[in-house]
Amino acid sequence: MGHTADHLLKAAALAAKGDADNALKAEQTTAATDSRCRHENNGVSRARRLQGGLRRDNIVLLGWSHITFDVVRQLQKQRELHRYQHKVHVNIVGFGSKCCDFLYNSKGFSFEELISRQASCICSTSAAVSASQSTGQTSYSGPLSLEQLDQLQDLAIPILADCSGQSSAQDLHSACMERGIYIVASNACSVCRLPPTSSRESVATTHTKTAVAEATSKPLLISEDHLAFNTKDNEIAISFSSVQYSNPLVVNESGTGAAASATGVLRDVITILNLLNGKNVHV
């Protein structure tokens, strides 16, 4: 009788251990699957992530200039409009330029802090430009590290608003595309200089065969689907699927003057959100 009880206890212990092992394996498999799905469908999760009924839009501003100054000013002035009309909460999580190292905070920066930093940066930049003209030297602090890009890609709908006008930003843009980070450029220079690689082709792909062919050599001009951008000197490279939001969207706006360019940047930011949420709304 005692031996039978011992056998039953051992059998129960082994069964419990087996159940625990199986449960652990199942948990690990589920975690791996969830992680894979999170990366494969990163765009879908971003597009559907809501906070208090608002889509959260996380922006990194690159380049402190009068364009970015107007971007921040307009964002501050129009935040209630964005919240109520577009159901968008715009969050600036990073900024950097020639005159200051790149700063990043996933929780975002207040408009007051951004405006204060911009004002001091623009003044110091003007002084630095005057000094550099005599030496012929200019400096540009690194915009984002790969680690910071990895952090940015995990946020809901991350957008790089490149207002720097730097022609050497193609590596940064390519790294953003690989991570599904959307790009709005106020200057055609950096987008036009993207290398004609498979990465670029995947970004500049549309539903038409002609568009795919053109994408191998230059950014694509789309007018039939995006009438709001059908103006002179505008260039748009876009990869978008209404079924699976897995590819990044690149919108390039060439404006006239700082205020016009800033307006174009903000319009493109809202357009990205509208496209990701299946809305055909021009702003």
Image (cartoon, grey):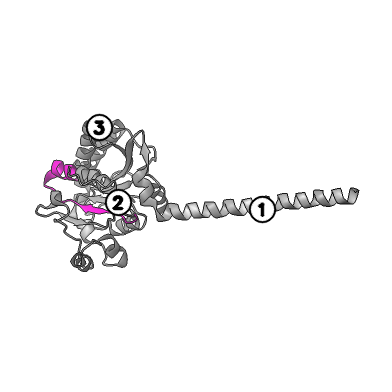
Question: Tags 1 and 2 in contact by the CB under 8 Å rule?
Answer: no
Instruction: State whether residue 128 appears in this view.
Output: no
Residue 161: horizontal and vertical position, in percent? 26, 47
Relative placement, left or right, of 104 versus 3 is left
Which quadrant is home to the C terminus? top left
Sequence-wise first label, 3 or 2 = 3
Examine the rendered structure and indicate whether residue 77 appears above or below residue 43. above
Residue 163: horizontal and vertical position, in percent? 23, 48
Report helix, strand or loop for mark 1.
helix
Find disc 3 in the rendering and name its residue. 84
Q: Amino acid at mark 2?
A: Tyr
**247 is within the stretch colored magenta:** yes
Find disc 1 in the rendering and name its residue. 21
Instruction: State whether residue 213 appears in this view.
Output: yes
Sequence-wise first label, 1 or 2 = 1
Report helix, strand or loop for mark 3.
helix
Give me the residue at 29% from left, 46% from top. 277
Q: Quadrant of residue 29?
A: bottom right
Q: Amino acid at mark 1?
A: Asp
**216 is within the stretch colored magenta:** no
Q: Which mark is on residue 182?
A: 2
Instruction: Look at discs 3 and 2 and give the one toward the viewer.
Output: 3
